[in-house]
Amino acid sequence: MTPAVLLAILCLRLISSSPAPDPVLDAEWQKWKIKYEKTYSLEEEGQKRAVWEQNMKKIKLHNGENGLGKHGFTMEMNAFGDMTIEEFRKLMIEIPIPTVKKENSVQKRQAVNVPNFINWRKRGYVTPVRRQGRCNVCWAFSVAGAIEGQMFQKTGQLIPLSVQNLVDCSRPQGNLGCYLGNTYLALQYVKENGGLESEATYPYEEKEGSCRYHPDNSTASITDFEFVPKNEDALMNAVATLGPIFVAIDARHESFLFYRNGIYHEPNCSSSVVTHAMLLVGYGFVGEESDGRKYWILKNSMGNKWGNRGYMKIAKDQGNHCGIATYALYPRV
Ligand SMILES: *[C@@H]1O[C@H](CO)[C@@H](O)[C@H](O)[C@H]1NC(C)=O
Ligand SMILES: *[C@@H]1O[C@H](CO)[C@@H](O)[C@H](O)[C@H]1NC(C)=O
């Protein structure tokens, strides 16, 4: 083979490494890039477009099937459209679940007289949805959220708490900043430290820094924290009687990444491996309670453009779906 022929073949390879874009999607692609302020180099563009197209086609297929009543929830193209599921899963690291001593777990409450619907947002317990961005600290957002709710109950004031304070300062307890953290260790930090600053005095930076906590600026503290027994009845009693609770779910799925609205149900979800921390703020059902579809309401930390303005509903009383009751904790203030 002459060098010229070889070069021609190589070039062909390079060009064909990303499949040709589907011209039908040109306008949507341009609109999406503007909406989410995406700019790519010339080399990147083809590869990103190919990933986006694959995601777009899966989302359209899901929603088409959903229209026929198959799934019970819709998906939508969002800011994560140029991410492959492999890239997303790198952020979804299994959260180690601590073994719990019995005395540290919420006393079994009587399963009577809990309401059919609870939504702590409507009662002023929940701060606006925030966005974790490039730093993988769902654990810190859900810890902040759980303490915010308990502080509101105690003081009547709803104050967004400092996630950055948790990220920077809970390393001695064993947390690893933007890479991986555990709610239980973050709560241990707040308990041992004796306080936590607010978002106003210690704002979120999307990266790890040195610990800059100062007790003069402390706005919240906890006396202890407790684990909720690993079943959905205990979780329902806890959220109904205590307020918003920290939970974690298996979120390693495209259906989660592109979730839009409705009651989430993912056949491939694990109920033992959990990867993403969220804040449980209530529950309810659609239709008749006896045969209706029950759901939990979760607050996420992926911004208010994700899901239903930053929130999701997920199937309740369907065998601990996605591990909703596998790792639940709440702080005492
Ligand atoms: C409290 O927070 C404010 C705002 O970030 C800051 O200017 C001030 O220095 C902090 N106080 C102390 C004692 O660190
Ligand atoms: C479930 O997992 C299998 C195997 O990884 C995969 O082929 C299938 O598409 C997945 N189903 C859904 C709904 O994601």
Image (cartoon, rainbow, N blue to C red):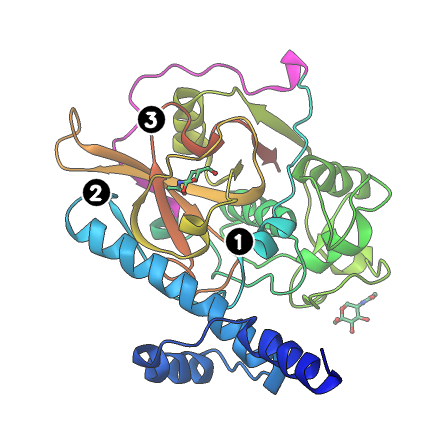
Q: Nearer the viewer, mark 1 or mark 3?
A: 1
Q: Residue at x 85, y 58 (%)?
A: 211
Q: Which residues are magenta?
A: 101-120
Residue 134 at x, y percent in the picture? 65, 64
Residue 286 at x, y percent in the picture? 19, 39
Report helix, strand or loop for mark 3: loop
Marks 2 and 1 sit apart, C-alpha to C-alpha, by 22 Å
Q: Is residue 303 above or below residue 252?
A: below
**Residue at image mark 3:** 318
The disc placed on residue 317 is none
* Quarter-of-image position of residue 184: top right
Report helix, strand or loop for mark 2: loop
* Quarter-of-image position of residue 159: bottom right
The disc placed on residue 85 is 1
**Residue at image mark 2:** 70
Amino acid type at circle 1 is Ile
- Which of these two is toward me, 208 or 186? 208
- Hey, which residue is sitting farthest front in the picture? 1
Q: Nearer the viewer, mark 2 or mark 3?
A: 2
Q: Is residue 287 above or below residue 196?
A: above
* Quarter-of-image position of residue 225: top right
Amino acid type at circle 3 is Gln
Q: Is mark 1 within 8 Å of ligand 2?
A: no
Question: How many residues crowd around disc 2 within 10 Å: few (fewer than 14), some, or many (20 or more)?
Answer: few
Q: Which part of the image, by quadrant, shows the C terminus?
A: top right
Marks 1 and 3 sit apart, C-alpha to C-alpha, by 25 Å
